[in-house]
């Protein structure tokens, strides 16, 4: 299942609709990076509210996405990690170090707006 | 009607990883596990199925209901006929990996579940059995 990427001003918003396979995650990674380049986006929000499980592959892919996008000078925020998913991630030993996270879409947008407040 | 005692999911591709963990979650919820525990079980299944795809190419996840003295739980068996693990102790150490993954797989799975057993024969395959008991 492909993840739709929405353009919202200077930002891109990718919202997971359901559980994703590895192939879907890889597709999201290349799709997002391409869009950031094409649209010269400043910020990216990845909404994982619908993600049932965050295993080592998903967490690594999200980190890669954030790092690639940072190299383009843009900022990524992961939003909507469910409490149960967060608990399982910690037990498994997964961290999203160096990647910004926020509670939900609204908080994610607020984070980006704060970050870019001097440029508007 | 009593629930099916055993569910098998063939693991041949990354799509099957998602299927296996969804079946595992559904089974866990059916057995009365909390949604938090069901997520732990689903995450463990995801990692075990991922190991099958990464190291053996194909294999099987089998979900079973297990009965203890006064308790019920779920067991997940991940088996493959892949190359096996030459050094299990090393594979159970945090940070060890040979497939370029994060190397958290097995020790992480052990932390997610209550019981963990692994048998592996080089050239013959690997079987991991994990269990979680309902509190």
Image (cartoon, rainbow, N blue to C red):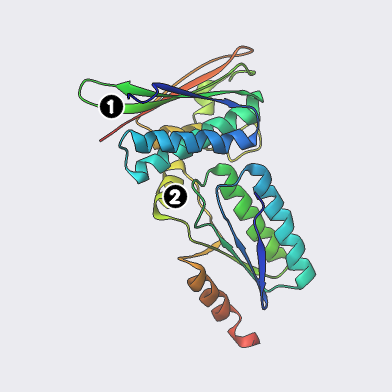
Chain assignment, label 2: A
**Residue at position x 56%, y 31% from top?**
B49
Q: Residues within 10 Å of mark 1 (few under 14, many from 20)?
A: some
Above or below A87: residue B102: above
Check residue A89 in the rendering and tell me which mark sits there, or answer none.
none
The answer to which of A118 and B46 lies nearer the viewer is: B46
Can residue B103 be seen in this snapshot? no
User: Which image quarter: residue B96?
Assistant: top right
Of the 4 image quadrants, the one containing the C terminus of chain B is top left
Does residue A101 appear left or right of residue B69 in this picture? Answer: right
Above or below A43: residue A29: above
The answer to which of A62 and A24 lies nearer the viewer is: A24
Chain assignment, label 1: B
The answer to which of A80 and A119 lies nearer the viewer is: A80
Q: CA distance from mark 1 to mark 2?
A: 24 Å
Q: Residues within 10 Å of mark 2 (few under 14, many from 20)?
A: many
**Residue at position x 69%, y 63% from top?**
A69
Can residue A71 be seen in this snapshot? yes
Where disc 2 sits, the SS reads helix
Does residue B1 appear left or right of residue A38 in this picture? Answer: left
Does residue A106 appear left or right of residue A71 in this picture? Answer: left
Q: Which residue is mark 2?
A: A85
**Residue at position x 60%, y 48% from top?**
A60
What is the residue that sits farthest to the right in this orientation? Answer: A38
Does residue B104 appear left or right of residue A32 in this picture? Answer: left
In the image, residue A49 lies at what x, y percent? 49, 57
**Residue at position x 51%, y 47% from top?**
A54
Q: Which residue is mark 1?
A: B72
Above or below A116: residue A45: above
In the image, residue A53 lies at what x, y percent? 49, 45
Of the 4 image quadrants, the one containing the N terminus of chain B is top left
In the image, residue A30 lies at what x, y percent? 74, 55
């Amino acid at each position: 299942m492909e993840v739709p990427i929405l353009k919202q001003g200077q930002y891109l918003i990718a919202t997971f609709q359901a559980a994703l396979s590895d192939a879907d995650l890889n597709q999201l990674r290349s799709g997002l990076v391409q869009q950031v380049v094409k649209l010269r986006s400043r910020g990216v929000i990845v909404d994982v509210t619908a993600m049932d499980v965050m295993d080592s592959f998903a967490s690594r892919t999200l980190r890669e996405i954030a790092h690639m996008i940072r190299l383009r000078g843009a900022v990524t925020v992961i939003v909507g990690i469910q409490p149960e998913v967060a608990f399982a991630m910690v037990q498994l030993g997964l961290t999203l170090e160096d990647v910004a996270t926020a509670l939900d879409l609204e908080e994610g947008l607020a984070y980006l707006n704060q970050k870019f407040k001097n440029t508007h | 009607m009593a629930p099916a005692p055993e569910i098998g999911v063939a693991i041949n591709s990354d799509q099957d990883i998602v299927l296996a963990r969804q079946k595992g979650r559904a089974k866990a919820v059916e057995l009365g596990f909390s949604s938090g525990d069901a997520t732990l079980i689903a995450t463990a299944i995801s990692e075990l199925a991922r190991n099958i795809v990464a190291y053996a190419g194909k294999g099987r996840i089998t979900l079973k209901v297990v009965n203890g003295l006064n308790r019920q739980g779920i067991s997940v068996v991940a088996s493959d006929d892949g190359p096996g693990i030459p050094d299990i102790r090393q594979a159970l150490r945090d940070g060890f990996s040979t497939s370029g993954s994060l190397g958290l797989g097995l020790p992480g799975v052990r932390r997610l579940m209550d019981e963990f057993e692994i048998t592996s024969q080089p050239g013959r395959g690997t079987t991991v059995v994990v269990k979680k008991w309902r509190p």
